Image (tube, rainbow, N blue to C red):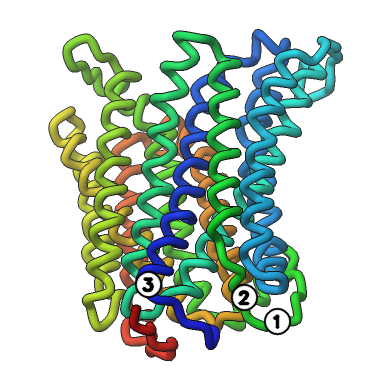
Amino acid sequence: MTDESYTTSEIRTIALAVIAGVFFGGVATGVAFPTLPLLDERLLISAALLSVILSANRIARLVMNTPAGAIIDRFGARIPMIAGLFTQALAPFGYIAGLHTPTAVLAVPVVGTVSLPGLVFVLARLFWGIGSAFVFIGAFTTITHMTTNDNRGRWIGYMRGGQSLGFPTGLVVGGVLTDLFGMETAFLAAGILALLAGTVATLVLPDVHGPTDGRSVGLRELPALLWDRPAVLTVGFGNFTLRFLWGGIILSTLARYASAHDMELAVLGAAGISGAVMALGVVTSGVTTVVTGWLSDMLSDRTLLTIPAFLSMAGGFSLTAFVPALGPLLGAIVLIGGGMGMAAPALLAILGDLTPGEELGRMGGVYNGMGDVGLSLGPLVAIPAVDLWFGYRLTYALCAVLVLSCLAVVSVPLLGSVNDTDRPLRAD
């Protein structure tokens, strides 16, 4: 990637700072999330504006991914990533400001009731999305620059594991803080955690980047960029599919699926069961991410991991489609979460293996952008698919077909495509 090499101890120190940044960022996101869906009455806003608040961060990140990647390629990952972490930290304090903003209400066509506090929350969520684009791409670029093909999968697995486990940790902390002390305390905790992540990064992160012309790639130029780099398009399609199915279909339909099939467990109804099942899936995905990231470094071709990963996810969706009972659902979520945790770090490490150092930011932005498209599109089609178009059985069966298509679109084209051109790791 670059001519500079890093010792094992240097990699460990810097990677732990990066992991802390994405973990605490995920915790801060999760802390705030349980309270956000409860804001419509307090802020005097319509359900439509509440939806805008919930999705504003994804919209902002989707728009910022490729510009953020170009900025990182031009100026290095250190300053943009630190700026992103502190920009994220503005969001929770913006929530607190929104709670104390004087109420001014007006009716807006289509959107409905809009209040000044509600607009403050929208602005805060936009800041979060902008910051998160720089954080993810900066983390990917930093880890990839420091590592070689022989150890990249391990450290990317650790990074993705921290990212995966941060959000559910925050959900628990945020729910408890809100119930015990109120949502303002939960928002304050989220802001402090985000500031902590930025402070740690400021103290430890190095400045890594390669030469580039720094040309920003807009969304309208994205198709041409991907056409010139078929391997990035292939890896990006895999990321799109994972995010579409995991963060879109499963997250949006699981509670309704449990309710439609009258699932109960002790005092838990559909909502409680869906929460427990998702928690099991997230933990499975996080643990698998760490283990398989390390395992991918031991393989001659880490693409091999994507084959059992996609098969596992397809088996999980098939089980959910054709055996609608609680026990099989638990087994299915383990298969889906395990496949997700196996495929995600492998794809990200492959992207790092294939990408020249001067293009890591932009290609990371493309990869992240395609994942965000999946995250945004999934919830839009999930509910109509199960309620209006296909029903649960056919919807989940089609999900299995989609993930199986990745064997042909992702796994086969990428097999044998990575050559180790990295610099050697110097001894301690």
How far is disc 3 from disc 2 in space, using C-alphas? 17 Å
Amino acid carrying label 3: it is: Arg
Per the rendering, the mark at residue 152 is 3
For residue 183, which quarter of the picture? top right
How many C-alpha atoms fall within 10 Å of the one at disc 3: few (<14), some, or many (≥20)?
Answer: many
**Residue at horizontal 66%, vertical 9%?**
42
Per the rendering, the mark at residue 343 is none
Q: Image check: 346 left or right of 41?
A: left
How far is disc 2 from disc 1 in space, using C-alphas? 9 Å
How far is disc 3 from disc 1 in space, using C-alphas? 23 Å
How many C-alpha atoms fall within 10 Å of the one at disc 1: few (<14), some, or many (≥20)?
Answer: some
The residue that disc 1 covers is 212
Q: Secondary structure at mark 1?
A: loop
Amino acid carrying label 1: it is: Thr
For residue 191, which quarter of the picture? top right
Q: Image check: 137 left or right of 158?
A: right
Whether the residues at callouts 2 and 1 have beta carbons within 8 Å, the answer is yes
Q: Is residue 48 visible?
A: no
